[in-house]
Image (cartoon, grey):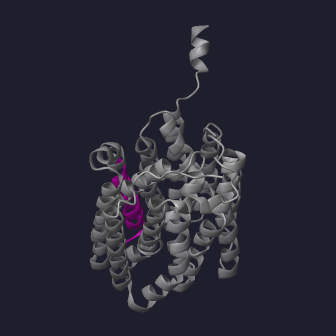
Amino acid sequence: MISKRLAFRPARPATIGSAYYGFFWPMVALYAPYFNVYLLELGFSGTQIGILSAVFPLFAFVVAPSLSALADRRGWRLRLLQISLVGWAAVLLLYRFPTSFAVFLLLVIVESAMRSPTLPIADGVIARMATRHRLNFGDMRLWGSFGFGAVSILSGVAWQQVGYSNMFLAAAVAVLPALLVARKLEEGELAAGNGRRSVLVLMQDKGLVILYTTAFLLGMALFSTFVFGGVYVTQLGGTETHVGLLFGLSALAEVPIMRQSGAIIRRLQGPPTMLLAMVLLGSSLLGHALAWSPTALIVFGVLKGAGYGLLFVVIVQLLNERAPLGWTSTAQSVFQAAFLGLAPLLTSPLNGYIYDRWGPSLLFGMMTAVIGLSIVLLLLAMRKNWFAPHNWQLE
């Protein structure tokens, strides 16, 4: 009798959150780091790659906040997350066949529609679980970084040996365990207030406005490394293995910093921790501009991973702390809309043109300056005390 009770004992929240990230991000790692390299092999130009890369940001900016706000108000977070994962897997299966730009554009549009709500909803749900059960969010999120890093490296070796023919099939199959774990996440509270003002209600808080503005600037810089990092490695003489190492070691560098993120945030507090992360990212982008070999670029990618790991945890925690009750998915979606939506949407085609015309050194040098601007803005907000607790007035 005792053994039966133990056998059906529910998984702990920390285990569920860790498992979701541990399955979700390895699935992404199977194909995302190599997607643009694959497009390059098909003969697409930097400008075409930039256009395709701007589609997901469009949906992250326009669609994800509205869907996340609806999910917060109706309690549909887990339902929408599961539907999105199923649709995403279906599109991955279709990526194997087309070779023309027009067909790829259509598939990228459908994938983006399915994919865009998954990040803010899952981050919001799991961050709220961490608060509810007094857990360190970074301890759960680090399993995503570890899985992404390890799978990026291994898949880089695999695709170099067998080619890209099975890459999308493997990724589609890998969606299944993430989908199963998503059913075990906690739905959480309904949004406070009547919800009519939706996203606009968050703009009452100057601290949130600053977080979203800096997210926009950081998104401009960091998205360029994701879109053109793999292409840059190959132009420096690297192989698919180098591409895997670039993305894999960068992700693995997030793991120890996420593990220590709770202690760092307690010691420095939120905004100074964010400042430290931005300094690390700025140094990394400067290294990208000066890189002279695949190995050098990989080293600077590791520095970027450490900065990003710290940045992501502290921003998710700050958004969770500052958002009104029940609005965490919406708060996360606005961050994603600025970071992965508006910024890349406005800059990806232009970045592709700059890359084609003047090369990666100028592109990443400009992005270093953008991170410098975000640092100045954060310092100004800290001086003005805009991160003081906000008294919400909800209808």
Q: Nearer the viewer, residue 240 or 128?
A: 128
Q: Residue at x 64, y 47 (%)?
A: 191
Q: Residue at x 42, y 69 (%)?
A: 218
Residue at the farthest top position: 1
In x, y percent, where is residue 254?
36, 53
In-image side of 106 versus 367 (left or right): right
Q: Please, is residue 156 above or below residue 81 in the view?
A: below
Q: Please, is residue 285 above or below residue 352 in the view?
A: above
User: How many numbered marks appear?
Assistant: 0
Magenta: main secondary structure equals helix
**Is residue 174 in view?**
yes
The region drawn magenta spans 238-255
Indicate the quadrant containing the N terminus: top left, top right, bottom left or bottom right.
top right
Q: Please, is residue 144 above or below residue 238 in the view?
A: above
Q: Nearer the viewer, residue 186 or 207?
A: 207
**Quarter of the view holding residue 283:** bottom left
Q: Residue at x 53, y 39 (%)?
A: 129
In x, y percent, where is residue 346?
54, 79
Q: Residue at x 65, y 69 (%)?
A: 62
Q: Nearer the viewer, residue 366 or 47?
A: 366
In-image side of 78 versus 17 (left or right): right
**Is residue 119 in view?**
no
253 in magenta: yes
In x, y percent, where is residue 128?
53, 42
49 in magenta: no
In-image side of 60 versus 133 (left or right): right
In-image side of 233 versus 42 (left or right): left
